[in-house]
């Protein structure tokens, strides 16, 4: 008799996501379907994200919705913050919206995450994320790409050469 296949838990211990920590996440739409291609979906997801950031005592250095995935850097802003819980609740709430409004779309089950060490260059990581639509040929300048935001910065004031 074969043993059942168990998924490998690749997450760090929960405590690693608590408090004043910054984490980069990438969440994909299942089968690379293009969900984030219109203003309405972006605005709904952005509103859910901003609400969840507030509820979880978190902020976002950057969030950028590509057609089939999301890049986001979350940061805990309080001892009680939990950035993993923030991301999980965001995916749960948006997943419910997708289920009700776009039933042919689904989030991929998990996401990729990377805890950003204090010695890493945050501006370089933000700029790398902002350049995604340029590298994908969706725009000639990240500043023109509409499906992005931050709760920490006004990107209109950022220098193009960052």
Image (tube, grey):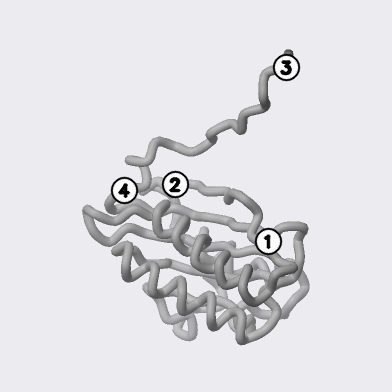
Residue bearing the label numbered 1:
29
Query: Residue 2, labelled with which disc?
Result: 3
Q: Given contact means CB atoms under 8 Å apart, are the residues at marks 4 and 3 in contact?
A: no
Q: Categorize mark 3 by other alpha carbons within 10 Å: few (<14), some (14-19), many (20+).
A: few
- In primary-sequence order, the first of circles 1 and 3 is 3
Query: Residue 18, labelled with which disc?
Result: 4
**Alpha carbons under labels 3 and 2: distance apart:** 36 Å
- In primary-sequence order, the first of circles 4 and 3 is 3
Residue 140 falls in image quadrant: bottom right
Residue at 70% in and 69% down: 103
- In primary-sequence order, the first of circles 1 and 2 is 1
Helix, strand or loop status at disc 3 = loop
Helix, strand or loop status at disc 4 = loop
Residue nearest the observer in this picture, 78 or 55: 55
Q: Is residue 160 left or right of residue 108?
A: left
**Alpha carbons under labels 1 and 3: distance apart:** 32 Å
């Amino acid at each position: 008799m074969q043993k059942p296949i168990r998924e490998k838990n690749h997450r760090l211990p929960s405590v690693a996501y608590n408090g004043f920590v910054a984490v980069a996440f990438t969440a994909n739409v299942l089968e690379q379907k293009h969900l984030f291609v219109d203003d309405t979906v972006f605005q709904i997801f952005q509103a859910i994200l901003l609400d969840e950031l507030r509820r979880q005592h978190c902020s976002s250095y950057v969030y950028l919705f590509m057609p089939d995935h999301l890049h986001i850097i979350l940061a805990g802003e309080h001892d009680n913050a939990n950035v993993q819980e923030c991301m999980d609740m965001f995916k749960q709430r948006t997943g419910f919206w997708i289920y009700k409004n776009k039933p042919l779309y689904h989030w991929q089950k998990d996401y990729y995450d990377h805890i950003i060490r204090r010695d890493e260059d945050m501006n370089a990581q933000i700029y790398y994320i902002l350049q995604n639509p340029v590298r994908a040929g969706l725009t000639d300048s990240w500043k023109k790409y509409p499906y992005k935001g931050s709760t920490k910065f006004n990107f209109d004031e950022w220098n193009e050469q960052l």
